[in-house]
Amino acid sequence: MDLKVLIVSSEVSPYAKSGGLGDVAGSLPKALRKAGVDARVVFPKYRTINDKFLTSCEYVSSFDVTLDWRKQKADIFTLNADVPTYMIGNDFYFGRAGYYGYGDDNERFAFFCKAAIEFLDYIDFIPDVIHCNDWQTGPICLYVKDRYSKLKYFSKVKTLFTIHNLQYQGMFPRDTLRMMELDDNYYFTNDKLEFFNAVSFMKAGLLYSDAISTVSKTYSYEIQTSQYGYGLDGVLRCRNHELYGIVNGIDYDINNPADSTKIYANFSADDMSGKAENKRRLQEELGLPQRADVPMFSIISRLVDQKGINLILQAAHNLLSRDVQLVVLGTGDYHYENMFRDLAYRYPDKVSANILFDDTLAQKIYAGSDLFLMPSLFEPCGLGQLFCMSYGTVPVTRTTGGLVDTVQHFDPETGEGNGFQFHDYDAGGLLWAIDRALEVYEVPEHWNKVVSNAINTKFSWDTSAGEYIDVYKKICGMAEPEAEAEEETEAEADKKE
């Protein structure tokens, strides 16, 4: 293993996960190691980590981390896993009920960022690339470039910063810079970390990393516009030559209906007979009428605006006037939770609202439903549409972000496409796509074809890992000779022109 990569994330599945970030940080390093990269992972040791993982963890060492006048101890632990996985422990910062949303998040993650660099002294591992993820790790890019690069063994370390969701930017008061031991007069300027009179951890990653990536090609273009850039589109346009869009993958060993132990009956692309049994058993478990002929729609999501939940609720009564069923699983904004509860009360034979998160139930819903609703306002990549397709469930999505890169509208005439899509962000557009899906559902030949296309759609981490490796090598100056020769030839051709 010649290339060494440290992946730093605030979440890593299956230990700590609140969304897609955890899935990526849990799956990507496995694919990287499979490709010959010495990939390792570090994340905070939260109190909420399941005891079954902690029983096998081992203490390595401890050291002090200073933040201005503060001095806090960082404990290093390793987990028994296929990928070398480290945790940074400190109960004062991470011994709490959740991951984020505390008044001292700036201090908590500044501590984690410094600790995630300094702990390398204690594990005898100096990476070629530190791969940072989202605002919680943005300061690492600044620290490595402006502070730690002066240390001999860090002089050649490069950083890649991945944007999973640009909307969340880690905005904190100006005195955060002093706490981070950074000169606020120097760094609190518009061309550095100042952002709307606050300090942005996200901006630190965007400005100081050696390259930027995001989780789909379409999203990499969208965030360079004022509509999706959340005020940082100018920064991203300035660095667009160092901005890469790499679509997330999923782990098909885990999300395989042929051998999953979490679903009611196994099935595969070659033998779909078990999917009908999953639908029947799901209806039975959720108290819905057991009907094979009724199309079942599902939603597995955070119940927030970004996921297009307001569109679904605007269209709900129109949708439920049809002969359909709707299964919801998720938590989020309180008023959305209550509106789904109200729908279940009004339509007891059509709606099952499960306001919770249950991974096993999620797998059962993916396997048992026919159509999956994902009308996102914006979607950096999205994993729900990939999960549902792996179980032969057809997605209904809006054309944004990674949904553009992974879902193709089904055309009954050509038989091409693995889902249904609409463009404009309104309930009418969503209902249009739903009607197209229901028309196809009524024609078994067409429906079987779109289901087959969906279950045979593969976005493997092996492909994505290869693209990440190309970026790592590029920023480290390890590009393949052939690629370098091609670049030189193109440059010469440009000069001649």
Image (cartoon, rainbow, N blue to C red):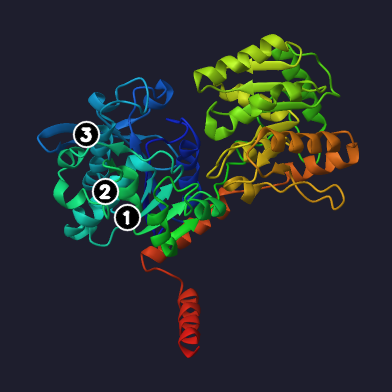
At x 20%, y 38%, the residue is 176
Tell me if residue 198 can be seen. yes
Does 207 appear above or below 29?
A: below
Give the alpha-carbon distance from disc 1 to disc 2, as whole Å. 8 Å
Left or right: 162, with 407 as reference point: left
Give the alpha-carbon distance from disc 1 to disc 3, as whole Å. 27 Å
At x 44%, y 61%, the residue is 240
Reading the chain from its start, which is encountered first: label 2 or label 3?
Answer: 3
Q: Residues within 10 Å of mark 1 (few under 14, many from 20)?
A: many
**Which of pointers 2 and 3 indicates the residue nearer the eye?**
2
Reading the chain from its start, which is encountered first: label 1 or label 3?
Answer: 3
Q: In which quadrant of the rendered image does the N terminus lie?
A: bottom left
Q: Residues within 10 Å of mark 3 (few under 14, many from 20)?
A: many
Q: Position of residue 68 (x, y in %)?
A: 12, 38
Left or right: 386, with 168 as reference point: right
Under mark 1, the amino acid is Leu
Which residue is the extreme one toward the left? 69
Tell me if residue 2 can be seen. no
Reading the chain from its start, which is encountered first: label 1 or label 2?
Answer: 2
Does 348 appear above or below 138?
A: above
- Residue pointed to by mark 3: 74
Under mark 2, the amino acid is Leu
Residue 193 circle label: 2
**Which of pointers 1 and 3 indicates the residue nearer the eye?**
1
> Is 313 or 210 nearer to us in this picture?
313
